Image (cartoon, rainbow, N blue to C red):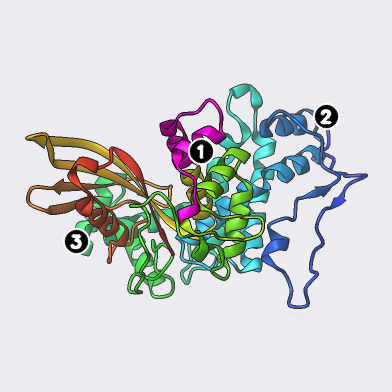
Amino acid sequence: METAWTWELPGYCAKYSFLTEPKGLTMREVERIFQFDPEPPVRGNLNDYILETVQSRDLRWFSFFLHNYENRLNGRVRRFLLREGLDRYDPERFLDYKMGCVLAMLDCLREYNPTQGADFLTYAHHFIGNALLTCRMQEEAGSFENVDEYKAVRGIAWLYNQSGQSEQAAIQKYVRKNGCTEETAAKFLALAKQNRSRVPFYQTVQDEDSEETGEDVSQDDHWDYAEILWNGIRAEAVREAFEKLNYREQTLLEKRNAICMTCGRVSPISTRLTFEELAVLFEGSTASGAERAYRKAVDHLACLLTEAGVLHMIRLKRKSQTKRKKKIAAAVYLYQVDNDGEWGEISFDFEAGTAEIIRLAEWDTTVSKKFAKQAIYHLQTSPNHNLPKDGIMIFEI
């Protein structure tokens, strides 16, 4: 007879209060619903909590897993809402999507077999994604038989919008790619167009037709932290991201940018430490080593702020290049939007000063192509001798 699952938590209570504001739920509450007091037992990694859960059939260990995984889960929900153009600061919606993911993980527990070699989160990744899509599907105008049909509709919508071709051409391309009938593909495209009248598919943070401007700060080695730090709703997000950095990263950023994240003081940029001075501060390092460590700290903070919806990020990677007279005459670059999704591809002729978008990145906007255009502008205005092999571009939302 199969042993029954148990789920009791004697001696533990919620670390943070719930529904404390008259206006209802707050983001601070829904982002911390799985935090316990006292701290749960420490294990080597997240999967150890899942192994304890499966072996003992005691869901108390799954609760301890959620306590430690919650921050990463928040990030995944936040990134999904961001890509869908939904309000990621709506507590009720955020909680709905988050609990959908938790229910999906609970379902996965029953089928998870640790002896197969995969970590639980690797095994559950697909099912968590389906849970997010199911929540999104339920908000759409149309009716879908299941999440697989919804994904098919999204797939042909993306193909149609990216190609810029006629409906029939998009249908035939989808048929060749997926092996379905033209009738099925046409049905999916009709559903996609029906839903687009309510919520556009495949937009990122803003609507395709909205204007968005942002300072490209990738050309310098420091950010205007004074502006970001005190810019309304972003202030808390910046502090939260900063607190996730290790001591070395925090010190490098503060000293190089002449700021104090504890008190909020911003000193004149002329008082910032040089890389030589940072090398002395961290004994055993060189100026070039301090510079590399600083840039890694900037990259880490940028990733955290991108997850929080404060910044946009474009990651660049040079695929190939052609040189003439010791200069890069032409090159092909891959680019990725907001550190996630399929990479796009752009071909550059630096001698002629032209560029061609070969393939849009998965989360780029299909009409304005604003991320590809940002990448093109950045690379075309960079000195030829300083064209990066890889790197990131950062600009504010």
Residue 278 is marked as 1
Work out whether mark 3 precedes mark 1 in sequence or the reverse, and give the earlier one. Answer: 3
Residue 277 sits inside the magenta stretch: yes
Q: Residue 354, how many percent across, how many down?
A: 12, 54
Under circle 3, the secondary element is loop
Q: Nearer the viewer, residue 261 or 273?
A: 273
Report the residue at 19% width, 61% height from top. Answer: 165
Q: Nearer the viewer's eye, disc 3 or disc 2?
A: 3
Q: Locate the N terminus by quadrant.
A: top right
Instruction: Classify residue 106 by image quadrant.
Output: top right
Q: Residue 169, how many percent across, how many down?
A: 19, 58
Q: Nearer the viewer's eye, disc 3 or disc 1?
A: 1
Under mark 1, the amino acid is Leu
Q: Nearer the viewer, residue 154 or 278?
A: 278
Q: Does the image show residue 183?
A: no
Q: Which residue is mark 3?
A: 165
As measured in the structure, the alpha-carbon distance from the residue carrying label 3 to the one carrying label 1 is 54 Å
Under mark 3, the amino acid is Gln
Dots 1, 2 in contact, CB < 8 A: no
Residue 1 is marked as 2
Under circle 2, the secondary element is loop
As measured in the structure, the alpha-carbon distance from the residue carrying label 3 to the one carrying label 2 is 59 Å
Q: Using a 10 Å C-alpha cutoff, classify the residue at mark 2 as few (fewer than 14 neighbours), some (14 to 19) or many (20 or more).
A: few
